[in-house]
Amino acid sequence: MNAPKEARSGLNQAIRNAMLIDGEWRQAESGETFAVFDPATGEEIARVPAGGAADIDAAVAAAGRAFAGGTWRAMMPAQRERLLLKLADLVEQHGDELARLETLNNGKLLAFSQGLEVGGSAQWLRYMAGWATKIEGSTLDVSVPFPPGTRYSAMTRRSPVGVVGAIVPWNFPLLMAVWKIAPALACGCTVVLKPAEETPLTALRLAELALEAGFPPGVLNVVTGDGVPGAALVAHPGVNKITFTGSTEVGRLIGARCGQDIRRVSLELGGKSPVIVLDDCDPAHAIQGAAGAIFLNQGQVCTAGSRLYVARRHYDQVVEGLGKVANATVLGSGLDPASQMGPLVSSRHRDKVMGLIGTGRSEGADIVAGGTALDRPGYFVRPTVVANAACKDLTLVREEVFGPVVVAMPFDDPEAVLAEANRSEYGLGASIWSNDLRAVQRLVDGLDAGTVWVNTHNIVDPNMPFGGYKASGVGREHGRSAIEAYTEIKSVCMAY
Ligand code: NAD
């Protein structure tokens, strides 16, 4: 169960025990630190500074100087592009070390750290680097008739929004940080990043690589800690925009505070994404698709397919097949190549997931696979399948579990399943499994979800906007939407 020694070796140099403020590695003003754990064993692997309001003050001031002082904002876009490309190269060059560090700290399978976190980070950095030189406005015809004889020429320019406070969760620590940092820096903003308290290590290593790439001091700052520095960042008058990924509960607090201060804000929040298997779908394909949709990253994915609606004629077969997949899954350290599923991120999160499974049991959920935690060190929860033919209102159907728990429900009528799929406070993702073009198109039109996948699930790309309907968030990341999110539009009107 323990990670193979060779997979962990050599990581000590990669573990930073300080935060980056104004180009310097610093301890918290308070001198306090907190422990970071390996979720596969429960062992402490590092102590990092417990940042507080004073550290946020210092980081925001540094980011403000780097922005307003002109270092970054005034830099030629092509130079910003080159630095981001250099950082992408460094992420790739140190890919093996970053991936092992991510798995050690977060628990996910090493293959996912390599492919999704490191590979994705390099891909996003390069894509956003390209945008740095392509930010544009438009020229506008205006029809102002006075004073007589005067004509006007108008245009729009996009200027960087300023100092960005970026707060990220623990499920994809490196990638989520890059999703914020890359477009913000490409646009000419400077950043104070607050990683999740469970998983600060790859963000710190990324910041170290940014220094090596040549980013000027203060352009990227990282303050480690929990919600305390997070809240201080949100409330800081020197921050022009907050970009947050995390729970809907914390998102509401952040949205309220930013509303009060009229601070720009983007929120990427929770989800309860439906997977809809139509009548024409091959059940074997559906089983594979549904398993991937929910069990990827131990279900700790905001778009995890946690509500599975299956056309009645395939329901028993799909539930049975999914149960077999769940029961056959080998749990173990993400650093062990034999593992097929790693641990959850923390003991607190494991207890939350087990608590929700317990609530499901008491409400009559029919657990056909899993439903238990492993009785050994580490925070392992078995992949869990609930066959919920009878009660539609289980807590497990309504609330985000953020773990490897799927509730399968049969349906007879595609119109009715659309209503069921939309009967959620969330609207982040959804997938449809079918080759019936007409039925698919109707569902695509009707689903309240920021992303709808067809015959796939959880696919993201830097060119594809990502975000939520309803309580899943406000705003979109990636593509042109990201550039819009980190810039202000300025109208310029010239008389001649
Ligand atoms: P969380 O909301 O508890 O924490 C997220 C971050 O916010 C952490 O860095 C945390 O320290 C910080 N934070 C906590 N309280 C704060 C406060 N009062 N003010 C400012 N910052 C504060 O979420 P989590 O448990 O780390 O992550 C899981 C959640 O994230 C799930 O709900 C999941 O769906 C969501 N998520 C959403 C997306 C998306 O793109 N929509 C992606 C990944 C995760």
Image (cartoon, rainbow, N blue to C red):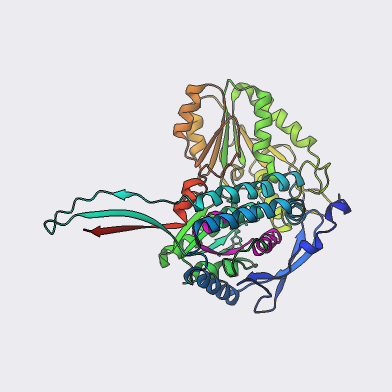
Q: Quadrant of ligand 1?
A: bottom right
**Depth check: 202 or 453 in front?**
202
Q: Position of residue 6 (x, y in %)?
A: 87, 52
209 in magenta: yes
Does residue 262 appear left or right of residue 406 in this picture?
Answer: left
Question: Where's the C terminus, which quadrant?
Answer: bottom left
Check if residue 448 falls in the magenta segment.
no
Q: In the picture, residue 395 is in which quadrant? A: top right
Residue occupying image coordinates x 25% and y 54%: 153
Q: Nearer the viewer, residue 206 or 384?
A: 206
Residue 131 lies, with reference to residue 433, above or below; the image says below
Say whether residue 76 is left or right of residue 3: left
Percent coordinates x, y for residue 458 in the rendering: 61, 40
Q: Bounds of the magenta span?
A: 182-211
* Image position, residue 138 (x, y; %): 35, 49
Looking at the image, residue 94 lies above or below residue 23: above
Left or right: 296 in relation to 272? right
